Image (cartoon, rainbow, N blue to C red):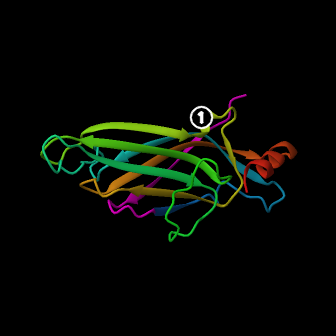
């Protein structure tokens, strides 16, 4: 049986200052546990884009000396729990509230600011799981961080393919076991 899916999009703007930033994603229209017909959100897949303000690949600062490479790093985490921004670390895969993590590294060996050579990795995404990721909280938290080797701010954009489903005994147990 195929479920009707829809998309939720959001962005966290990571300044090139190595400080973690956060965007709250309101799920109040999709998650409702306090009614006679409670419903939850299922995320089937998440796509991520690391982009500059024009939608292109962000530039890395020029090399500092001939023969050296400047490498820039940016990462993103999506969680079911808010953590204080004074906490310096990014939410990680081994934490119950983590739904998605990904990162990009770009290396520039040119004497001018350039996009360089990029490599990206997705550590955890709902599409890696058999039935996606079930969400029973009113908000998700999108965290992003970019280091100071970027020549510009990095917009970390996500697109989530989702569906809404009625709470059953089975998915209520799954929620209780998978989320803190």
**Residue 91: percent from left, percent from top:** 56, 55
Outermost residue, top side: 1
Q: In this view, does 49 lie to the left or right of 4?
A: left
Check disc 1 and report its element: helix, strand or loop: helix
Q: Is residue 10 magenta?
A: yes
User: What residue is rendered at 60% in x and 64% in y?
Assistant: 82
Position above or below: 121 against 39: above
In this view, 73 is above or below 13: above
Check the image and name the residue furthest to the right.
Answer: 169
Q: Is residue 87 above or below residue 2?
A: below
Q: Position of residue 35 (x, y in %)?
A: 80, 61
Where does residue 4 sit, x and y in percent of width and height? Answer: 64, 37
Q: In which quarter of the image is residue 132?
A: top right
* Residue 167 seen from this side: no
- The quarter of the rendered structure image containing the C terminus is bottom right
Q: What is the x, y in percent for residue 156?
A: 41, 51
Magenta residue span: 1-20
Which residue is at a point 79% across and 54% down the rendered structure image?
38
Residue, disc 1? 127
- Report the front residue among 88 and 130: 88
Which class describes the residues within 10 Å of circle 1: few (<14), some (14-19), or many (20+)? some
Does the rendering let one see residue 67? yes
Residue 4 included in the magenta stretch of the image: yes
Q: How many labels does the image show?
A: 1
In the image, 35 versus 78, the foreground residue is 78
- Position above or below: 117 against 64: above
Residue ID at (52%, 52%): 77
User: On the rendered image, what quadrant is the N terminus found in?
Assistant: top right
Residue 22 appears left or right of 37: left
- Residue under the image location 61 percent in, 39 percent down: 126
């Amino acid at each position: 049986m195929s479920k009707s899916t829809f998309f939720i999009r959001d962005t966290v703007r990571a300044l090139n200052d190595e400080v973690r930033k956060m965007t709250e994603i309101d799920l109040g229209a999709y998650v409702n546990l306090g009614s006679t017909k409670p419903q939850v959100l299922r995320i089937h897949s998440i796509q991520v884009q690391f982009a500059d303000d024009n939608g292109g690949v962000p530039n890395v600062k020029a090399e500092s000396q001939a023969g050296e490479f400047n490498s820039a790093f940016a990462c993103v985490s999506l969680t079911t729990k808010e953590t204080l921004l004074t906490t310096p670390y990014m939410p990680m895969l081994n934490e119950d509230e983590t739904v998605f993590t990904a990162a990009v590294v770009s290396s520039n060996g040119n004497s001018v600011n350039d996009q360089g050579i990029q490599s990206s990795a997705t550590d955890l995404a709902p599409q890696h799981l058999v039935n996606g990721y079930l969400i029973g909280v009113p908000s998700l938290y999108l965290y992003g961080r970019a280091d100071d080797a970027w020549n510009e701010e990095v917009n970390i954009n996500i697109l989530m393919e989702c569906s809404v489903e009625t709470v059953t005994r089975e998915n209520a147990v799954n929620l209780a076991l998978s989320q803190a």
